[in-house]
């Protein structure tokens, strides 16, 4: 149960950070559960929930959630006294407007929205910096796999050359399902839907649209490059057949949807693509099953760093968003700098029509 | 060549962050090379180097390094105008005094020193917070593998249950060498020495002293627990024989030095140990070769996150330290909070004398 008298774990007596959730879907409700559970987090106080279908959804919630302030109007949330808004609506335009509006209203923002970051990230980060507020987005890429902090902070001292990654949990669940059972892609999609790893129409996942948006964010973090998702070569995973797996197996590997970005600084040439790709059987990619994500980051100084973790699901994404909320609660004046970006002179995609290969 | 007229990449015209290095060994010299290279980092300006044997070492440096201010007296560095001191001396007492002195002198500190953090970390972090300065230590655990940020920031929203990791590059190089060649441990140590992965006396590495200090730091980050290295059960790796590898091979695995910490919050019981451990052939641990580090982090909400990376070496450790320097340069008023720690009611070690097994 929410205990309003709990103080911040870190500074006894300090005001708790007031949080509003915008979008009460899978991720929003997972965050609400965490922040209102008996083991809730002392530094964070969930006070507001905004959702288009507030009335209907509120009625189905346990008391700890239903008794919060609910509204179906974004403006109510923007004019409330929350310190931070968690944007988990998803999608493009209206979400961008909400994030911009929140920053203009003096709120910090935590978002899980890769489309917002990929398309408007640099402008919104600059706005946040000017407003003296924070825009954090660990949850926008890789679910609970902390790749945004790894590239943006932990490896900021590295000269990153290449990022190869599985960034889409749905296509990984589909491909690893075909891999394990030898079934057709339609059967694997049906199975992934049944397990909650795929939506009824998984085409944005299979076609690489989702991974391209995430790869665009990683290009900003790893290479300080401005690359729009539609500048990234995508090849669909929807046409992978069980025969392709048999052929890959004969070559000692299997198939995964890989997103690759490699930057040659001297030539200002970026290679970036998302495609079904041959991966060696022992690689971290082949070992990623279900909705798992994985990343292999190659730097000029340290060599190779790998990261894996659950790439989708409400609870996993909530972990990333709550980590961001805690960073804001602990240091409300922290600067999340707007990166100074350049554009690559040349953007290359995949060079031929054969199955791509992970390096 | 160092270009004093370069401005910060992020805020054109902003003053660069002035850096002094304390300890010009493998890591210190790797950092100095990076910060004085033609591709040096605009936000950071290396100005001072302090080393006991300053005179002798300075003479062997290229001009970009030798022309900096060198001193053999720590006090000279503390009274200089540097903003941040990178402590890469290693060892216990004098280094603690230097870090404390630096914070008292109003400097922020970046350290690669696991002993300083394991023994005096909480007190020094509190001092830093009171001084309005930062103490950062990504380089103290896992080399370039960004596990300090992963546990402290990226997974701050997780309820972490268990951390299992290879934290000592030397013993991993020795064990993976025995594994690959079937040689004796003495031959593997000699080979690791020849490759620069082991010191002449690797006993602190093989005996688990090094990994226990790092595990103590991870217990602070993952569980908010105060655990001293000597409270952690350590079993030496020095008595592992080639027969042990043959036996492990028959069981489908191999042997690695694993550090494990698992916390049961309800019972306030911590299990923590460092020991040569049976690991399954396909696990991330068996796949870690040479001085690589690896970590498997299990949480109540997201499940399993893994991280791997080069755990030792000047360039890898420099990547972590430079990442910390950049975090300070970008936000000099940032708060690195001193964690509020408790002590576990019970600390358990390994329960029997057989070879430990990774979960």
Image: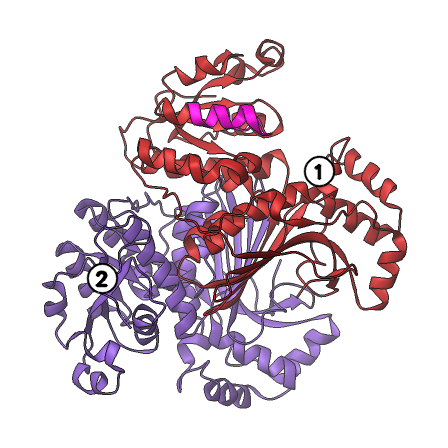
Chain colours: A purple, B red
Q: Give the quadrant of residue A177.
A: bottom right
Q: Which mark is residue B10?
A: none
Same-chain check, marks 1 and 2 = no
How many numbered discs?
2
Towards the viewer: B11 or A71: A71
**Which residue reaches farthest front?**
B345
What's the residue at 31%, 40% (across, down)?
Answer: B334
x and y percentages locating residue B272 in the rendered image: 61, 55
Towards the viewer: B133 or B231: B231
| Residue on which the image places disc 1 | B204
Q: Is residue B39 left or right of residue A15?
A: right
Q: Chain of mark 2?
A: A
Residues in magenta, as a range? B87-101
- B90 in the magenta segment: yes
x and y percentages locating residue B248 in the rendered image: 82, 63
Q: Is residue A68 left or right of residue A9?
A: left
x and y percentages locating residue A243 in the rendered image: 66, 83
| Residue on which the image places disc 2 | A5
Viewport quadrant of the C terminus of chain A: bottom right
Towards the viewer: B251 or B120: B120
User: In this rendering, is residue A126 above or below B271?
Assistant: above
| Secondary structure beneath label 2 | loop
What's the residue at 34%, 77% (across, down)?
Answer: A26
x and y percentages locating residue B170 in the rendered image: 71, 42
């Amino acid at each position: 149960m929410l205990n309003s008298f709990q103080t911040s774990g870190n500074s006894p007596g300090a005001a708790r950070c007031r949080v509003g959730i915008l979008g009460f879907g899978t991720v929003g409700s997972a965050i609400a559960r965490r922040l209102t559970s008996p083991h809730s987090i002392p530094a964070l106080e969930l006070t507001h929930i905004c959702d288009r279908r507030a009335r209907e959804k509120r009625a189905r919630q346990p008391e700890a959630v239903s008794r919060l302030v609910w509204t179906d109007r974004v403006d109510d949330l923007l004019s409330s006294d929350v310190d931070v808004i968690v944007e988990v609506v998803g999608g493009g335009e209206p979400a961008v407007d909400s994030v911009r509006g929140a920053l203009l209203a003096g709120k910090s923002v935590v978002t899980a929205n890769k489309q917002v970051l990929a398309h408007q990230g640099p402008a919104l980060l600059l706005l946040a910096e000017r407003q003296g507020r924070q825009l954090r987005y660990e949850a926008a890429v890789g679910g609970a796999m902390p790749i945004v902090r790894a590239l943006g902070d932990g490896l900021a001292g590295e000269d990153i050359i290449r990022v190869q990654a599985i960034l889409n949990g749905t296509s990984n669940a589909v491909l690893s399902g075909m891999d394990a059972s030898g079934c057709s892609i339609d059967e694997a999609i049906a199975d992934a839907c049944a397990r909650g790893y795929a939506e009824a129409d998984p085409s944005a996942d299979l076609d690489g649209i989702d991974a391209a948006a995430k790869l665009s964010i990683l290009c900003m973090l790893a290479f300080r490059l401005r690359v729009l998702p539609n500048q990234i070569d995508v090849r669909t995973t929807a046409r992978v057949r069980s025969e392709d797996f048999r052929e890959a197996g004969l070559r000692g590997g299997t198939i995964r949807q890989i997103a690759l970005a490699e930057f040659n600084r001297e030539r200002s040439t970026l290679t970036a693509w998302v495609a079904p790709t041959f991966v060696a059987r022992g690689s971290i990619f082949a070992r990623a099953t279900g909705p798992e994500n994985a990343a292999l980051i190659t730097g000029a100084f340290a060599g190779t760093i790998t990261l894996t973790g659950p790439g989708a699901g409400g609870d996993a994404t909530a972990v990333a968003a709550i980590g961001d909320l805690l960073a804001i609660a602990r240091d409300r004046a922290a600067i999340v700098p707007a990166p100074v970006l350049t554009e690559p002179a040349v953007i290359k995609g995949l060079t031929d029509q054969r199955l791509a290969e992970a390096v």
